[in-house]
Amino acid sequence: MTTLGGSAVTDPGEILAQQETSQNPYAAYRAVRDAGPAIWSDVIGSWLVGGYNEVKDVLMRSSTFSSSGIKGLNVLRLPDAVRRRTPLIETIGLTPALVFSDPPIHTKHRRLVNRPLVPRAIASRKDWLESLCNETIDAMAAKDLPDVVNDLALPLSLRIVVELFGGVAEDMPLYLELSQAQRQFFAAYHPSADVADATEAVEGDFYEYVRAYLALKREQPDDSLLSALVRPDGDGTTIDDKEIFVICHVFLTAAYETTAAAIGSMFYALLTHEEELARVLDDAALVRPAFEELVRWESPIQKLIRIAQEDTQIGGQPIAAGDPVTVYLSAANRDPRVFDDPDRFDIGREGHDALAFGRGIHFCVGAGLARLEGSTATRLLLERFPNLRIADGWTPLWTRYPQSRMLDSLPVTLAS
Ligand code: HEM
């Protein structure tokens, strides 16, 4: 039994599952942390883990806590007739790939996707990234009611992912459609047959798109992700187009809205904390630590799921083989046993070791790019518009998806 807002709560999952909680989940996260190293939730059907040390422990023990098979749980809930007519959804949901896989599959996929994201490759993309930021800021500045989330963070992040794949700006609508369809299907507990059919249609378009690009990249290799995925591994092994297609899916989900969420929240944090904003305006070198603090304070990925592979313990709490375990990164990142005054947004925080990019073998492969992207967008927008302010009358609405923390909009005025 734990308390929340003065009331006794036996299952913090009951509060976490309520939509309103997504507007301010931090009291519920505190309740999860206070309840012990791991607490079973009947409502969520999982162990809940919110302490920093315990979350880190689960992420580090990847052979005990598996990532495989988690994406497709809702595919298994579809009626057989629907499953038979949606073969691409079936493939995406049930093929272990990258973040939804364990070694040795994970090791193979990770090696391939890492190619365009190694520090040298990221450094060589600095000018490209600056020019995409400037182009997107120009377009945003031309709007009557500019919005940091919808006119900067989302389009910039999408454009970067599309070009990283090896595509061009004209391909963006397809990626956008795919990303929305994915959300509707894979983020839903019980997607309807109609949603499954609509998702399958978009998947078909994306599959054809990926195959066409793969043929091109085999002929004309370059430094893109799709090119990296068709280049044989050191021992000469290659992976087939279907497996690449599934990797592309996982990659898009991992890279697009996460970074957009971070950029939107970054401006929200700065524009609601005048002192911190003044420090960043005074010294652009503080943009990097500010971004690091932001992903701790409003972690874009709130939670991750693992499945216990054997009987084990988390902080002394017995966990049975087969049990799902939900780790709350955002609760861990505000654990007062590790971070002083954890609810405070403080860009001068030292000894930062937040878990916003995960930990262990699945540690975010795009963290370097995300950091560069977030800090470049912040620096350039503030350089151009140092008098940026939140538009009068706006109140935050955090998009209601339990896994991520992202503002719906952030309308601003560009000059005083
Ligand atoms: C602020 C932005 C971002 C945040 C907060 C973030 C966070 C994370 C987290 C927490 C994980 C670990 C997932 C797990 O353990 O199950 C992860 C994995 C991953 N991220 Fe990111 N990410 C961001 C941006 C990006 C970008 C820009 C890319 C690609 C360009 C990317 C690609 C990936 C991939 C491919 C994985 C899976 C890695 C693996 O399984 O080995 N992420 N990310």
Image: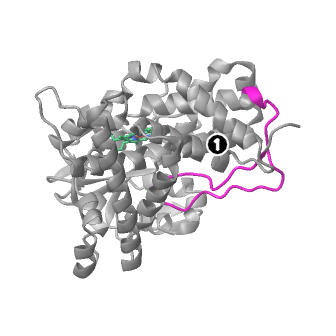
Above or below residue 300? Residue 291 is above
Which residue is rendered at x = 41% and y = 60% of the image?
A: 182
Count the numbered circles shown: 1
Using residue 285 as the reference point, say whether residue 178 is left or right of it. Answer: left
Quarter, ligand 1 = top left
Extreme-right residue of the structure: 416
Q: Residue at x 69, y 36 (%)?
A: 137
Task: Tell me if I can see residue 360 in this picture.
Answer: no
Near-viewer residue (215 or 396):
215
- Looking at the magenta stretch, what is its main secondary structure? loop
- Asked if 119 appears above or below 161 in the picture, the reply is above
The quadrant of the rendering that contains the N terminus is bottom left
Amino acid under disc 1: Leu
Q: Nearer the viewer, residue 291 or 345?
A: 291
Residue 320 vs residue 226: left or right?
Answer: left
Q: Quadrant of residue 268?
A: top right
- For label 1, the crowd category at 10 Å Cα-Cα, with few meaning under 14, some 14 to 19 and many 20 or more, is many
Picture coordinates of residue 246 (x, y %)? 28, 51
Left or right position of 184 against 326: right
Q: Residue at x 55, y 56 (%)?
A: 25
Percent of width and height locating residue 74? 31, 68
Residue 309 visible within the image: yes
Question: Which residue corresponds to mark 1?
Answer: 152
The secondary structure type at the circle numbered 1 is: helix
Q: Where does the image place residue 288, in percent across and percent down from the top left?
A: 57, 25
Is the C-beta of the residue carrying label 1 under 8 Å from the nearest atom of ligand 1?
Answer: no
Q: Quadrant of the C terminus?
A: top right
Confirm whether the magenta stretch covers residue 10: no
Q: Nearer the viewer, residue 376 or 283?
A: 376
* Residue 140 percent across, percent down from the top left: 71, 43
- Look at the image and give the residue range highlighted in magenta: 383-412
